[in-house]
Image (cartoon, rainbow, N blue to C red):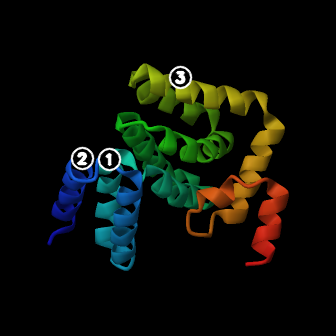
């Protein structure tokens, strides 16, 4: 079965049989992600389609992977980040996704050039639903007003960026995170 066709069926199942279960979506999309990892063409197709499948439930996972690449190569990865934010702005915007994305977006905003953030805000975010606009505005305000906290977000992400996305680890206080990583 072709990848795109499979993702469409998964999307349909998410909305009909699974009652929009994030757990179902993430479990299934992780399986697909792992299955396409060694095929660059399929991986690219997956990265383009998956943000729009299952209400955007897999966006935090994809954002983590893309942000990790962005830290090493911002110029070439920026379009992928922009696409993920566009997808998030068009997603079902549920609390779980918003909470998981929060530290990642804060980290991204802190690392990105202000000009690029302003462009993103003007051309993507400000054309979204008011709830989404408010979400991003709060994060931008947080980044501008909480430099020490933002440094902590960046430090935590840098410690974890080469791990599989793990939002529970990312939410640990920095001291506990370092201890946990020492014992792994």
Q: Which residue lies under the disc numbered 3?
A: 134
User: Residue at image x 39%, y 25%?
Assistant: 128
Name the foreground residue: 11 vs 118: 11
Local packing at callout 2 (Cα closer than 10 Å; few below 14, some 14-19, many 20+) is few
Q: CA distance from mark 1 to mark 3?
A: 24 Å
Chain-order first, disc 1 or disc 3: 1
Q: Is residue 20 above or below residue 130?
A: below
Q: Which residue lies under the disc numbered 2?
A: 15
Whole-percent x and y of residue 180? 77, 69
Name the foreground residue: 9 vs 155: 9
User: Residue at image x 46%, y 23%?
Assistant: 131
Whole-percent x and y of residue 182? 80, 75
User: Residue at image x 76%, y 71%?
Assistant: 181
Local packing at callout 1 (Cα closer than 10 Å; few below 14, some 14-19, many 20+) is some
Local secondary structure at mark 2 = helix
Whole-percent x and y of residue 151? 79, 46
Q: Residue furthest top?
A: 130
Q: Are marks 1 and 3 in contact (CB under 8 Å)?
A: no
Q: Which residue lies under the disc numbered 1?
A: 20
Labels 2, 3: front one: 2
Which quadrant would residue 144 be assigned to in this image? Answer: top right
Name the foreground residue: 66 vs 16: 16
User: Residue at image x 71%, y 60%?
Assistant: 158
Q: Is residue 42 above or below residue 89?
A: below
Quarter in which the C terminus is drawn: bottom right
Q: Is residue 76 visible?
A: no
Drawn side of residue 68 relative to residue 141, left or right: left
Q: Are marks 2 and 1 in contact (CB under 8 Å)?
A: yes
């Amino acid at each position: 079965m072709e990848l795109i066709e499979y993702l469409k069926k998964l999307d349909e199942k998410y909305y009909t049989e699974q009652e929009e279960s994030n757990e179902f979506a993430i479990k299934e999309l992780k399986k697909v992600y792992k299955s396409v990892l060694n095929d660059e063409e399929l991986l690219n197709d997956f990265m383009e389609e998956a943000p729009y499948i299952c209400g955007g439930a897999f966006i935090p996972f994809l954002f983590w992977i893309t942000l990790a690449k962005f830290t090493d190569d911002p110029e070439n990865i920026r379009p992928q980040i922009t696409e993920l934010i566009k997808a998030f702005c068009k997603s079902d915007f549920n609390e779980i996704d918003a909470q998981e994305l929060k530290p990642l977006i804060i980290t991204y905003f802190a690392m990105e050039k202000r000009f690029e953030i302003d462009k993103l805000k003007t051309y993507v975010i400000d054309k979204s639903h008011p709830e989404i606009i408010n979400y991003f505005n709060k994060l931008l305000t947080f980044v501008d007003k909480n430099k020490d906290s933002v440094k902590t977000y960046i430090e935590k992400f840098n410690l974890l960026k080469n791990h599989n996305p793990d939002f529970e680890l990312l939410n640990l206080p920095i001291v506990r995170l370092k201890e946990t990583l020492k014992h792994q």
